[in-house]
Image (cartoon, grey):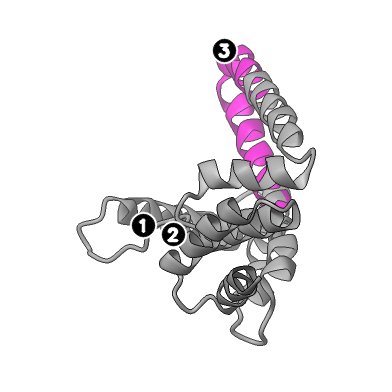
Amino acid sequence: MGCVPIINTYSDPRILCIVALWTVLLLLLAYCLCGRNLQIQRILTMGLAILAVPFLPASNIFFTVGFVVAERVLYLSSIGSCLITVLGFAALSKKYFGKKLVLGLTVGALIAWYMARTVQRSTEWVDEDTLFTSGLTVCPLNAKVHYNIGKLRAEKGQAGIAEKFYREAIRLNPAYDQALNNLGNLIKV
């Protein structure tokens, strides 16, 4: 939808993140199969399953899923990533006795940062205008964000601003039929 640029070449440095992700996932899977501690194996297997399984329906491989449904389903995978993260912190605190304080402070800082970010995001969900405008700062190349702002401006009677946002949505996605339709209806009046 324009938020994350597509990787077009093998020289794109973001490929290293993909390689690192798959390496870590494969190492965790290998531990699930060949690890020594049965309790950790079970928790890790559950975490990996909760992390990976929600991606199956969202992938549109088996059946078509709309964007809203896929977005809601993918929230479940955060439970798996939290479970794996906690398991990692628990393993590190058992291994390094002097590091418990550092690990505690790190976890505390992460919790405080996530709480602050949640409060900030909650203020952006106050009304549609604030929500869509905040989306524009995060994803300026997303046609749907421009379309939503245009639709909201049209509903408020701001035809000139609405037309600008509809045209930008169409420039970003020339086949965006809803934006084309709404722009036509706006100009027709």
Point out the tag, 2 or 3, that comes first from the N-terminus: 2
**Residue 60 visible in image:** yes
The residue under label 3 is 98
124 or 89, which lies in front?
124
Question: Residue sitting at 55 percent across and 75 percent down?
Answer: 180
Q: Picture coordinates of residue 107 (x, y %)?
A: 65, 24
**C-beta proximity under 8 Å, tags 1 and 2:** yes
126 or 180, which lies in front?
180
Q: Is residue 83 magenta?
A: yes
The residue under label 2 is 22
The residue under label 1 is 19
Q: Residue furthest right?
A: 126
Question: Residue sitting at 62 percent across and 74 percent down?
Answer: 188
Q: From the image, give the main secondary structure of the stretch colored magenta.
A: helix
Q: Picture coordinates of residue 114 (x, y %)?
A: 67, 30
46 or 136, which lies in front?
136
Point out the tag, 1 or 3, that comes first from the N-terminus: 1
Magenta part of the protein: which range?
79-107
Residue 69: image quadrant is: bottom right
Describe the element under mark 2 as helix, strand or loop: helix
